[in-house]
Image (tube, grey):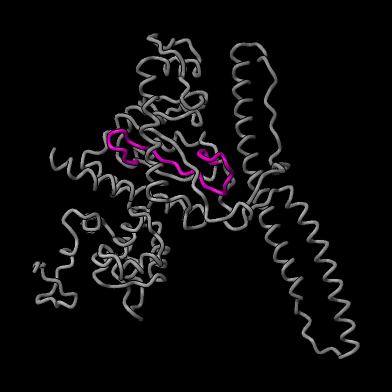
């Protein structure tokens, strides 16, 4: 008869098991546990020192951070899935040391410490830097549209708001008049026994809707005034430059002088929209599907050495034009030095951007205009850009040189796979939170865990180096 290895599902342990032994050496969960133990979690611990000590003791912050980081690394950040995994998944059971935090505790911890969790991004980036995964020889910048935790069908245009406001005002007035008539009739029949402050359900619903529309309309109007004030300041600056030039040359400047509009008279564009669920998000066109979604524009600067994200941020602006300078400045803030070369697509180009003094010392490769996928920037030339060329012409010539062509061609291979790994492999396509501040912190958390995974996978290579 064939002899099998012993199998006894009811076998008892003779000695207490070591939890780490449940996982093979080099497992991602053990790696994350070790990394978190090396991080400074004092900002989280300090929050609990402010309490009065009453009630049940909270779960240990280090354990909760480990669970959340592992969940984000594996693309399962749902608090309910984490709770279930603490019973069913060996890796979660090891990280939780056989404790089982309920989903409410997990959700509350993440919500309470979200900003601090996002702030761990720089600490993990420093670990990557010390491991030699960040060289800053060439960084590439790009943005991706990430869906907001809100439906685009909950958005309304300024034009529609104005129309809906009038319609609701008329409906509320009619309902109030009808309510008054009913009150008068009931007072005659039953006497004055009612409080008089009860609102019919239909009236309350319309009044609350009217209030939301008015708030959203006022917010759009304020945004329009702020934008108009910035445009007015820029126009006044151009007028002053024009005046100084005329003073120096003694001749009247050509062309029409810029007009300075009154910001107080500014009104939103009729198509300007605001979402009632997440007002900070905007309707944007998603590049991959070319469909319009309620989203945020998630930005990342990626180092070419090992695709480490060296700067990350989030904006509600669909256009990337304003992001080049602050994003490259953020690289220096995070790692202490500037990149030697930086590339970005045409969405980031403007003469002001590529000539900004804040980016001095960075060799920029930013396309002045968009090109279809697969279309070459132009014939490769060995000619050196002419000093007399305009900023746009100079950049065009620079990208046509063999060096410029090769560097710009690398841009896609550096940054776009990072978004693919985040969206396709780990499944992050929609944010869990609402409001720009919270969403920005979650984006940092997503980028932090991307870097953690890169550091984890580089361990064998680093060990052999």
Q: Quadrant of the N terminus?
A: bottom left
Using the image as rendered, state which of residue 250 and residue 395 is in the foreground.
Answer: 395
Residue 91: image location, x then y, percent: 26, 62
Q: Would residue 131 appear left or right of 228 to someone viewing this image?
A: left
Q: Residue furthest front?
A: 1
Which range is magenta?
A: 286-309
Q: Quadrant of the C terminus?
A: top left
Residue 307: say if magenta.
yes
Residue in view at x 33 percent, y 63 percent: 44
Residue 366, how many percent across, how many down? 45, 26
The answer to which image quadrant residue 168 occupies is bottom right
At 82% from the left and 70% from the top, the residue drawn is 175
Residue 62 falls inside the magenta stretch:
no
Please identify the quarter of the rendering in which residue 319 is found.
top right
Residue nearest the observer in this picture, 60 or 90 = 90
130 lies left or right of 59: left
Vertical side of 231 occupied by 71: above or below: below
Give the vertical position of 21 relative to 133 (above or below).
below
| Residue drawn at 9 percent across, 77 percent down | 14
Image height of 184 relative to 279, above or below: below
Residue 43 percent across, percent down from the top left: 32, 60
Taking the image as shown, residue 21 lies to the left or right of residue 141, namely left
- At x 73%, y 52%, the residue is 161
């Amino acid at each position: 008869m064939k002899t099998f290895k012993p199998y006894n599902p009811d076998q008892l342990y003779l000695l207490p098991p070591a939890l780490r032994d449940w996982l093979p050496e080099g497992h991602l969960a053990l790696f994350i546990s070790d990394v978190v133990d090396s991080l400074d979690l004092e900002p989280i611990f300090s929050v609990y020192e402010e309490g009065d000590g009453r009630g049940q003791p909270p779960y240990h912050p280090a354990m909760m951070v480990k669970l959340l980081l592992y969940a984000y690394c594996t693309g399962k950040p749902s608090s309910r899935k984490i709770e279930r995994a603490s019973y069913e998944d060996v890796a979660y059971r090891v990280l939780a040391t056989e404790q089982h935090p309920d989903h409410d505790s997990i959700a509350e911890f993440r919500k309470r410490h979200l900003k601090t969790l996002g702030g761990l991004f720089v600490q993990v980036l420093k670990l990557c830097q010390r491991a030699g995964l960040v060289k800053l020889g060439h960084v590439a910048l790009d943005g991706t549209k990430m869906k907001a935790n809100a439906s685009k069908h909950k958005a309304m245009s300024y034009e529609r708001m104005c129309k809906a406001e009038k319609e609701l005002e008329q409906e509320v007035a009619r309902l109030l008049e009808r309510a008054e008539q009913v009150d008068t009739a009931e007072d005659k029949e039953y006497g004055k026994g009612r409080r008089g402050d009860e609102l019919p359900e239909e009236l309350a619903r319309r009044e609350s809707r009217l209030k939301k529309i008015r708030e959203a309309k006022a917010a759009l109007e304020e945004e329009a005034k702020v934008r108009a004030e910035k445009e007015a300041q820029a126009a006044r600056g151009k007028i002053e430059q024009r005046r100084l030039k005329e003073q120096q040359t003694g001749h009247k400047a050509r062309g029409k002088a810029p007009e300075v509009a009154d910001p107080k008279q500014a009104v939103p564009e009729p198509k300007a929209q605001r979402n009632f669920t997440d007002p900070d998000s905007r309707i944007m066109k998603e590049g991959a599907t070319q469909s319009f979604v309620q989203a945020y524009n998630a930005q990342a600067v990626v180092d070419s050495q090992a695709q480490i994200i060296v700067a990350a941020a989030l904006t509600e602006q669909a256009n990337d034009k304003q992001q080049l300078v602050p994003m490259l400045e953020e690289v220096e803030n995070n790692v202490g030095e500037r990149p030697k070369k930086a590339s970005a697509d045409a969405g980031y180009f403007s003469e002001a951007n590529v000539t900004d003094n804040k980016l001095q010392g960075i060799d920029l490769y930013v396309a002045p205009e968009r090109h279809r996928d697969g279309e070459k920037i132009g014939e490769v030339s060995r000619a050196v850009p002419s000093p007399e060329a305009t900023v746009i012409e100079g950049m065009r010539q620079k990208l046509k040189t063999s060096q410029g062509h090769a560097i710009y061609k690398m841009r896609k291979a550096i940054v776009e796979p990072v978004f693919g790994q985040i969206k396709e492999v780990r499944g992050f396509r929609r944010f869990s939170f609402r409001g720009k501040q919270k969403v920005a912190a979650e984006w940092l958390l997503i980028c932090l865990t991307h870097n953690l995974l890169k550091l984890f996978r580089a361990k064998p290579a680093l060990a052999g180096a």
